Amino acid sequence: AYTKLLTRLDGGYFQSSPDRKVYFRFTGEYSGLDKLPYKVYNISREDISAQCTLKNIYSPLQPESLKPGDNAYELDCSALPKGYYNLEVKNEKNEVLYLRFKL
C-alpha cells in the first residue's frame, strides 16, 4: 500500500514492508524538477539518505525521476537497522512534506 506525505509530522508512523521498503505517492504539480529531492533522517536527525535507494515505480529507467502528475515511489531502506526514521521531500515550491516510518 502506498501512503501520502504530510505537510507536518503528527504522532503516527507508516510501517514499512517486511523487506524494509516504504511506498509513497507524490504529485508533481509542475515540470520544474527532474529528480525528486528527498532526505532520510534517523532519530538523531543525521542525514542517512545515502543508505537508502529511491525508485519511481512508473519510470524504472530513471529511478529518482519526477514527472508532472501522480508518481509512486519505493524507498528501499534494507541497509538500515530497525527503528523510526523521517522522510522529507521538497516539492517544486520548496515546501517540505514529511513521512515518519518504522522499519
Image (spheres, rainbow, N blue to C red):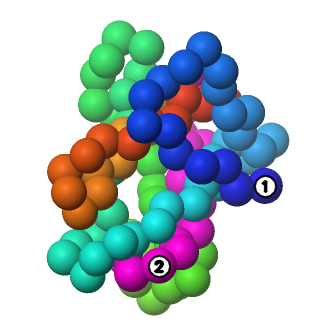
Which quarter of the figure is the C terminus placed in? top right
Decide which of tag 2 and tag 1 comes sooner along the chain: 1
Side (left or right) of 89 relative to 6? left
Q: Nearer the viewer, residue 13 or 60?
A: 13
Residue at 52% from the left image edge and 45% from the top image edge: 5
Region rendered in magenta: 65-85
Side (left or right) of 96 relative to 28? left
Name the quadrant containing residue 62.
bottom left
Q: Position of residue 1 (x, y in %)?
A: 78, 55
Does residue 47 belong to the magenta stretch?
Answer: no
Q: Nearer the viewer, residue 99 or 93?
A: 93
Q: Position of residue 82 (x, y in %)?
A: 64, 23
Residue at 29% from the left image edge and 22% from the top image edge: 46
Q: Position of residue 70 (x, y in %)?
A: 53, 75
Question: Which element is circle 1 on?
Answer: loop
Name the quadrant containing residue 16.
top right
Residue at 35% from the left image edge and 11% from the top image edge: 44
Residue located beneath label 1 in the image: 1
Q: Position of residue 29 (x, y in %)?
A: 35, 72
Q: Nearer the viewer, residue 24 or 19?
A: 24
Q: Are marks 2 and 1 in contact (CB under 8 Å)?
A: no
Q: CA distance from mark 2 to mark 1?
A: 19 Å
Which disc is residue 39 wearing?
A: none
Q: Give the amino acid at mark 2.
A: Gly
Which disc is residue 69 wearing?
A: 2
Q: Give the amino acid at mark 1.
A: Ala
Does residue 79 belong to the magenta stretch?
Answer: yes
Vertical position of residue 75 compared to residue 45: above or below:
below
Residue 39 seen anywhere in this rendered image of the structure = no
